[in-house]
Image: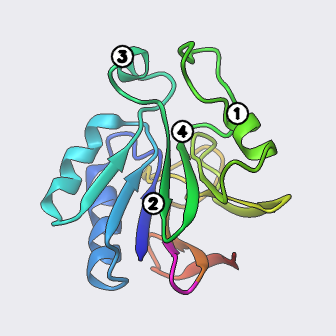
């Protein structure tokens, strides 16, 4: 099972669509995950015949809607995955929201897909793989190019791709 992951598209629909198209056509992604900023951007992903999982960013009006989950735990190929815009709790959390830092520290998940920082990274933290796909903005003040990720649960590998070059900028087995 292959899952494409995006975060922080911030209205850059062309970049989000390009990344999704690449993952669908070239990597054969079967599920797409959007980690917030901006929640409505995910409408562009409906072009693809794939399941889309999404959570809102912490400053989105959707984040304050109790009917929309801010964080999820999904299971893929026997691996539990936290899906969250942030890696830690946030001041805008609702009372019922999962606390990502606790879920990770207690190893209640095997992987955590997080965004918010715009900094692409794959890190093993005490047995939990933390993946941040970066951002899809045209320009970012932190200096990172637009990027996105793929996690292959059959091959047990996570990759981050540079959007412009479609090259792998980081990868890690899990």
Q: Is residue 25 left or right of residue 58?
A: left
Residue 62: percent from left, percent from top:
35, 22
> Secondary structure beneath disc 4?
loop
Are discs 2 and 4 less than 8 Å apart at CB? no
Residue at numbered disc 1 = 88
> Secondary structure beneath disc 1?
loop
Tell me which residue sits at (57%, 12%) in the image. 95
Residue at numbered disc 3 = 65
Looking at the rendered image, the quarter that the C terminus falls into is bottom right
Compute the Cα span from label 1 to label 4: 9 Å
Compute the Cα span from label 2 to label 4: 12 Å
**As displayed, is residue 173 above or below residue 120?**
below
Are discs 1 and 3 less than 8 Å apart at CB? no
Upstream in sequence: badge 2 or badge 4: 2
Compute the Cα span from label 2 to label 3: 23 Å
Compute the Cα span from label 2 to label 1: 19 Å
Compute the Cα span from label 1 to label 3: 19 Å
Q: Is residue 134 left or right of residue 148?
A: right
Residue at numbered disc 4 = 85
Q: Nearer the viewer, residue 57 or 12?
A: 57
Tell me which residue sits at (76%, 62%) in the image. 123
> Secondary structure beneath disc 3?
loop
Upstream in sequence: badge 4 or badge 3: 3
Q: Which residues are magenta?
A: 151-155
Q: Which mark is residue 5?
A: 2
């Amino acid at each position: 099972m292959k899952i494409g992951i995006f975060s922080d598209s911030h209205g850059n629909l062309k970049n989000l669509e390009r990344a999704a198209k690449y993952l669908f056509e070239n990597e054969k992604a079967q599920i797409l995950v959007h980690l917030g900023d901006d929640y409505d951007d995910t409408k562009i992903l409906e072009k693809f015949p794939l399941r889309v999982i999404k959570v809102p960013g912490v400053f989105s009006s959707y984040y304050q809607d109790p009917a929309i989950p801010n964080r999820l735990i999904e299971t893929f190929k026997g691996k539990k995955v936290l899906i969250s815009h942030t890696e830690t709790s946030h001041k805008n959390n609702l009372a019922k929201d999962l606390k990502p830092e606790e879920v990770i520290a207690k190893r209640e998940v095997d992987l955590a897909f997080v965004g918010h920082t715009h900094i692409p990274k794959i890190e093993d933290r005490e047995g939990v793989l933390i993946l941040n796909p970066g951002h899809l903005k045209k320009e970012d003040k932190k200096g990172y190019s637009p990027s996105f990720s793929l996690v292959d649960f059959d091959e047990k590998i996570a990759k981050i791709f540079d959007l412009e070059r479609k090259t792998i900028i980081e990868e890690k087995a899990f």
